[in-house]
């Protein structure tokens, strides 16, 4: 299996530290709002990487954090007049709901930064003892030039970086000895959450969180560290400097970064305001369609979000689900064991499985893997009806397995979209007008079974989700 490693800018053979095991760390979201579909791209992509590794028989320790202490969380908490923890807990729960909708498996562990402060303090202490960090007025800085390999991930030259920083002075950072140095610990400001430390009350910088959590839950050297490509610099570059300076061991053997989800050619982001939350999109499309859409491109290629492209993914997914429905019908209505003809078709099925695996082994080329699934769908549509029951069973099992690796649920989405609910309500109104109360009641019960509650009022029918 070959993986493109951002560290070497090459595809490399994947060899884990420990045979049969993979330790994988994926930088998670800062929880101050609903996640947008750009944030969902790394979740879906790296969940698929995990699923393929598990299919290959690896025991995967998948760690993904929640950054639950941050300026943006504090700002939102102040606006609402609540504690930061109220905001972070609320959006951790909402994020988990979106992940479930996208069929992203829960991580082996989802550590929260605020629960790991002790470990971060210990790491910062080690860095000070080793001469890689210093304290000034309650702030602790990492001495960037003390780490000789700084810039090795982002391929930035430290002297060029220095030139770019020379004139920039940040208020409150007067004690910084070199403009390249970055914050490991910052002192408490009035009204902000803070923890006791040898340098006074305060809170950790963002980068040290991931260094500590990957060390604690995986080890000094992890196999795969992943995130969106905007994290390469400075976040991941700084994580390497902190971890390798502290542990004297390589930090991560493979660095994987997904390209952006764009909208009109621009990165989708909260700050630019050009985003859709996963929650908003779920009103318009089943989230399975969004997952399938994300995997229709290679993870290192930019992907443009547009209704036309999502519609085409919706049709593509529907073709797969229809083939699976027909295979299920064939399993219940066909009879008998494999015939010579079936055997011939199964050889073709095995070729397509190989094609799918070859695509995934080549740096997780999900686009080509999906192409192999479509070929199998075509074969199923031609052969299943006249094949034996055993053939239909084998083909169905294979197709379901290949879909499952991509996290595609092969049961049809039960949940009704808003538009479906409205249509059923209209049909119920029409039935009532025609005094067909049996049909009207039937529709009400059908909606109730799916958690839709109707309220008849003078202004018409109102509905809510239970
Ligand atoms: P944040 O909450 O901004 O730290 O982002 C969480 C994760 O989402 C990081 O891995 C980011 O790189 C990733 N991310 C944010 N915006 C996008 C986007 N438009 N496309 C792909 N990944 C993104
Ligand atoms: Zn991180």
Image (spheres, rainbow, N blue to C red):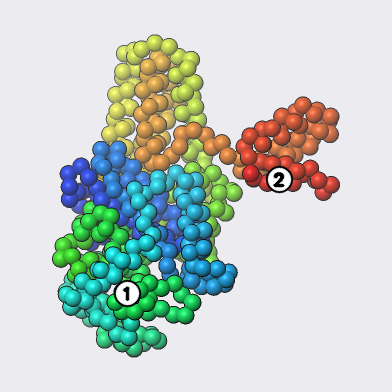
Q: Nearer the viewer, mark 1 or mark 2?
A: 1
The residue depicted at 47 percent of the width and 80 percent of the height is: 190
**In the figure, residue 360 lies in which quadrant?**
top left
Could you tell me residue 81's position as x and y percent? Answer: 57, 71
Up/down of 64 relative to 145, above or below:
above
Could you tell me residue 408's position as x and y percent? Answer: 43, 39
Kind of element beneath mark 2: strand
Residue labelled with disc 1: 197
- Cβ at disc 2 under 8 Å from ligand 1: no
* Res 307 seen here: yes
Could you tell me residue 342's position as x and y percent? Answer: 35, 17
The residue depicted at 48 percent of the width and 64 percent of the height is: 85
Which residue ends up furthest to the top in the rendered image?
A: 336
- The one of 449 and 433 positioned closer to us in this rendering: 449
Query: Which mark identifies residue 373?
Result: none
In the picture, which quadrant includes the C terminus?
Answer: top right
Up/down of 298 relative to 178, above or below:
above
Residue labelled with disc 2: 463
């Amino acid at each position: 299996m070959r993986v493109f490693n951002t560290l070497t800018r090459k595809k490399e053979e994947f060899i884990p530290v420990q045979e049969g095991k993979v330790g994988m760390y994926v930088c998670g979201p800062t929880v101050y709002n609903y996640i947008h579909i750009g944030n969902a791209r790394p979740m879906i992509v790296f969940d698929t990487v995990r699923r393929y590794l598990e299919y290959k028989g690896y025991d995967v320790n998948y760690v993904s954090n929640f950054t639950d202490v941050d300026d943006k969380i504090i700002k939102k908490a102040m606006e609402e007049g609540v504690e930061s923890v109220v905001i972070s807990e609320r959006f951790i729960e909402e994020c988990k709901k979106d992940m479930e909708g996208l069929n992203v498996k829960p991580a082996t562990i989802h550590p929260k930064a605020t629960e790991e402060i002790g470990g971060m303090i210990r790491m910062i202490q080690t860095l000070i003892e080793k001469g890689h960090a210093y304290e000034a007025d309650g702030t602790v800085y990492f001495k960037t030039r003390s780490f000789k390999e700084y810039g090795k991930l982002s391929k930035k030259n430290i002297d060029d970086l220095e030139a770019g920083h020379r004139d920039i002075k940040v208020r409150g950072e007067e004690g910084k000895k070199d403009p390249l140095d970055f914050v490991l610990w910052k002192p408490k400001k009035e009204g902000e959450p803070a923890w006791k430390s040898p340098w006074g009350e305060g809170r950790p910088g963002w980068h040290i969180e991931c260094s500590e959590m990957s060390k604690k839950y995986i080890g000094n050297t992890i196999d795969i560290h992943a995130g969106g490509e905007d994290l390469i610099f400075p976040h991941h570059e700084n994580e390497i400097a902190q971890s390798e300076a502290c542990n004297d061991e390589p930090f991560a053997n493979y660095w994987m970064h997904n390209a952006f989800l764009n909208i009109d050619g621009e990165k989708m982001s909260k700050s630019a305001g050009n985003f859709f939350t996963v929650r908003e999109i779920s009103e318009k499309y089943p989230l399975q369609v969004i997952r399938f859409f994300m995997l229709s491109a290679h993870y290192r290629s930019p992907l443009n979000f547009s209704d036309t492209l999502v519609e085409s993914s919706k049709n593509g997914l529907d073709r797969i689900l229809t083939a699976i429905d027909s295979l299920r019908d064939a399993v219940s209505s066909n009879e008998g064991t494999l015939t010579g003809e079936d055997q011939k078709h199964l050889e073709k099925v095995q070729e397509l499985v190989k094609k799918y695996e070859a695509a995934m082994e080549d740096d997780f080329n999900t686009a080509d893997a999906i192409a192999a699934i479509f070929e199998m769908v075509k074969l199923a549509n031609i052969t299943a009806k006249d094949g034996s029951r055993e053939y239909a069973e084998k083909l169905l099992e294979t197709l379901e397995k290949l879909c499952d690796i991509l996290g595609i649920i092969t049961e049809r989405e039960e949940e009704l979209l808003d538009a479906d609910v409205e249509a059923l309500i209209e049909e119920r109104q029409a039935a009532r007008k025609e005094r067909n109360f049996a049909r009207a009641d039937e529709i009400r019960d059908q909606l109730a079974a799916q958690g839709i509650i109707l309220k008849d009022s003078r202004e018409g029918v109102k509905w809510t989700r239970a």
